[in-house]
Image (cartoon, rainbow, N blue to C red):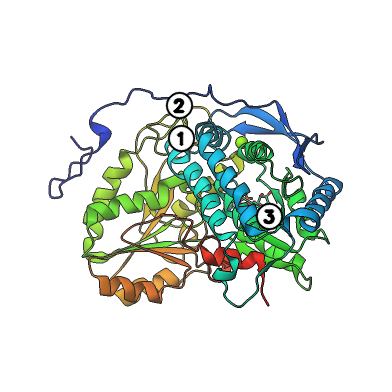
Amino acid sequence: MGKTANTSVRDLLFGDLWDYAPAPESRDHLTIHERYGHFIDGKFVEGEDHFPSINPATEEQLFEVASADEATVDLAVKAARKAYDKVWGKMPGSERAKYLYRIARMIQEKARALAVAESLDGGKPIKESRDVDIPLAAAHFFYYAGWADKLEYALPGASPSPIGVAGQIIPWNFPLLMAAWKIAPALAAGNTIVIKPAETTPLTAMMLAEIIQEADLPPGVVNIVNGAGQTGAAIVNHPDIDKIAFTGSTDVGKIIQRALAGSRKKLTLELGGKGANIIFDDASLDQAVEGIINGIFFNQGHVCCAGSRLLVQENIADELMHKLRHRVSTLIVGDPLDKNTDVGAINSREQLLRIQELVAAGKDEGAQIFQPSSPLPEKGFFFKPTVFTEVTPSHRIAREEIFGPVLSVLTFRTPEEAIEKANNTPYGLACGVWTDKGSRLFRVANALKCGIVWGNTYNRFDPTSPFGGYKESGFGREGGLHGLLPYLEVR
Ligand code: NAI
Ligand code: MG
């Protein structure tokens, strides 16, 4: 039976009653080249200064990828400018839409290969890349394809027109999905693009480049340059870019904001978070446990909107924590390509070191750590699902974004205290509220200073729903009608 001996609380039964046979997804339908350069003006171009992209679950090199210098970024910007002036900026929306629909359908057709690539290059479980990342990426292209010829209706009387060339920089936690979030609305609005994938996860971006080429998108409309922070900075500082869209760390967000101060460039930032998942005593606890698990262990906790601070009403804390510890013990940590895996590999050694440092700080500052007893794979970057109790608001693990599978639990007595604690952070991206009472849900949701509030669920995404932060979590919205606005000029 269950692994915990407390008889006063009935345990939910999960798959810890039997062992799973390995169920690895096949790699056969995926071709990975030895080297990738850049995608500029509709062509794959060779690059220089190659560096390895590894599989974080095995630490083996998957391929090499080039690093774009300022001259290469300049070629990409020139191609984007030419495509904007000559073709894309003038094309009727109904024509632009056809390309977006085509890209969406091709992502669906190649979904299996894309999912395997995403899990190999970045470490996320195949069930997530297969069921979340890739379908949502296609859905974003479908959704914004629908807006391309209806911009006048989206903003009645505002005569919306495109901005020009957009420079976009994306992170490693949802590589293809973040590319779709950035590319689809920009193209629908009539802009052209220079985009840079994250240095640890460029594979699906290069596969998207193949799709874009096959879809016959006019050359230069989307340009993809590879590289790390220096390449990103070259995009940010290029004088002929009209708008920058960035998703990543708050530190780099601040660097970009400083770099653009006083310039004419428009900017949207989607940065970090320290989301509160608030559980009231009238909530359905078994459902809340699933929401807590999904909130912090989805994608190894590499999620800017993760529910990384659990706020539990004090009178149910013991029962909820008992159920939660039991459930955490049943999570399967391991091979990202195995269809049974719940928690895959940490994206990089650097990220693993950051998580280890913050977890050590949690222990040093006196919080109580819980981790399941099952061992981790010997090779690769893995970290056990971790729950800290006896956390106080001043602990580093309660204040700083860990960006890993680590939950910090705090308690509260009244709704006012829950709201105060939830808002006690420089961030303001996402929160969750679990209660049986609709009136309480709406009252608390309205008092939370964050861009997204989930009610009795967590980490649900939809292209029609705007996403973005308050405070140091950034500004501007992606998704939905709001997601078009940063890419449009209005009169
Ligand atoms: P990062 O912010 O350095 O990387 C994100 C992207 O920005 C990458 O494409 C990177 O190449 C690029 N970049 C780096 N420096 C740049 C610069 N000076 N100018 C322009 N672009 C630049 O994030 P990193 O170092 O990978 O992760 C550090 C922490 O950031 C994580 O532990 C996590 O807390 C947070 N993070 C948050 C993300 C989110 O979705 N909100 C995504 C990634 C990281
Ligand atoms: Mg990689």
Q: CA distance from mark 2 to mark 1?
A: 8 Å
Give left or right: position of 255 versus 145.
Answer: right
Circle 1 SS class? helix
Extreme residue in the left direction? 8
Q: Residues within 10 Å of mark 2 (few under 14, many from 20)?
A: some
Q: Is residue 21 above or below residue 147?
A: above
Quadrant assignment, res 11: top left
Q: Residue at x 80, y 36 (%)?
A: 47
Q: Residue at x 25, y 55 (%)?
A: 320
Q: Is residue 201 above or below residue 79?
A: above
Q: Residues within 10 Å of mark 1 (few under 14, many from 20)?
A: many
Circle 2 SS class? loop
- Which residue is under mark 3? 168
Total labels: the figure holds: 3
Q: Amino acid at mark 2?
A: Glu
Q: Amino acid at mark 3?
A: Gln
Q: Is residue 248 visible?
A: no
Q: Amino acid at mark 1?
A: Ile
Q: Residue at x 31, y 38 (%)?
A: 330
- Which residue is under mark 1? 126
Q: CA distance from mark 1 to mark 3?
A: 26 Å
- Specify which label sits upstream in the sequence, 2 or 1: 2
- The disc at residue 25 is 2
- The disc at residue 393 is none
